[in-house]
Amino acid sequence: MPRYIAFLRGINVGGHRVKMDRLRSLFEELGLTNVSTFLASGNVAFSIDSGDVDELRERIESHLLRELGYEVATFLRSPAELAAIVALDPTGGTRQEPAGSSHYVILLDAPAPESLRSALSQLNSDMDEFHFSETEVHWLIRGKLTESPLFEGGLDRALKGLRTTTRNRNTLQRISAKTGYLEAP
């Protein structure tokens, strides 16, 4: 039976609060099985007997909108896809991540359009560096997220309303380990 991880955008921000047991029950109402949550930031692992990812994403988003009263963008990855994301060295071995650096992964619905690639490439600096993989953007920061000049809206302007959600790579590693595809760091 296929297993997926749903990465939800904005499930517990902006005045919205959903307890993890409620979130699990919302997924179970869709007929999903082996549902588990990870952290309180909208990470839900589950099994389903269907492999139509686009239809599944639409079902989840529609159900969450109906039940919660607000839109929740949903990004699905299989455990194998997640393991590949966290195993990827986006620099091809050309960059050594210094102590205190941060690595975030921006999840997209589809491969990054050329306009996004161009906009983010223009934001590369001594502090921020962007690399593209399948349906993800790897954001490497030399320092903490809050120290980046892009933290206060610069990145949002470059994303120009694209559907995205962002997770720290360490969080993704821990989720991947929980699904049994990687060992925890």
Image: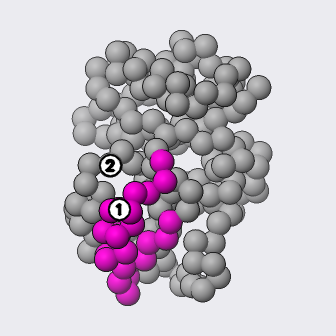
Q: Is residue 147 visible?
A: no
- The residue that mark 1 highlights is 116
Residue drawn at (55%, 62%), measured in percent from left and top? 133
Q: Does the magenta stretch include residue 82?
A: no
Kind of residue at disc 1:
Leu
* Label 2 element class: loop
- The magenta region covers 110-132
Q: Are marks 1 and 2 in contact (CB under 8 Å)?
A: yes
Q: Quadrant of the C terminus?
A: bottom right
- The residue that mark 2 highlights is 162
Where is residue 30 drawn, in percent x and y?
Answer: 55, 15
Whether residue 2 is situated above or below residue 78 in the rendered picture: above
Residue drawn at (57%, 85%), measured in percent from left and top? 95
* Label 1 element class: helix
Q: Does the magenta stretch include residue 113?
A: yes
- Of residue 120 and residue 44, the one placed in the foreground of this image is 120
Kind of residue at disc 2:
Leu
Where is residue 24 drawn, in percent x and y?
Answer: 54, 23
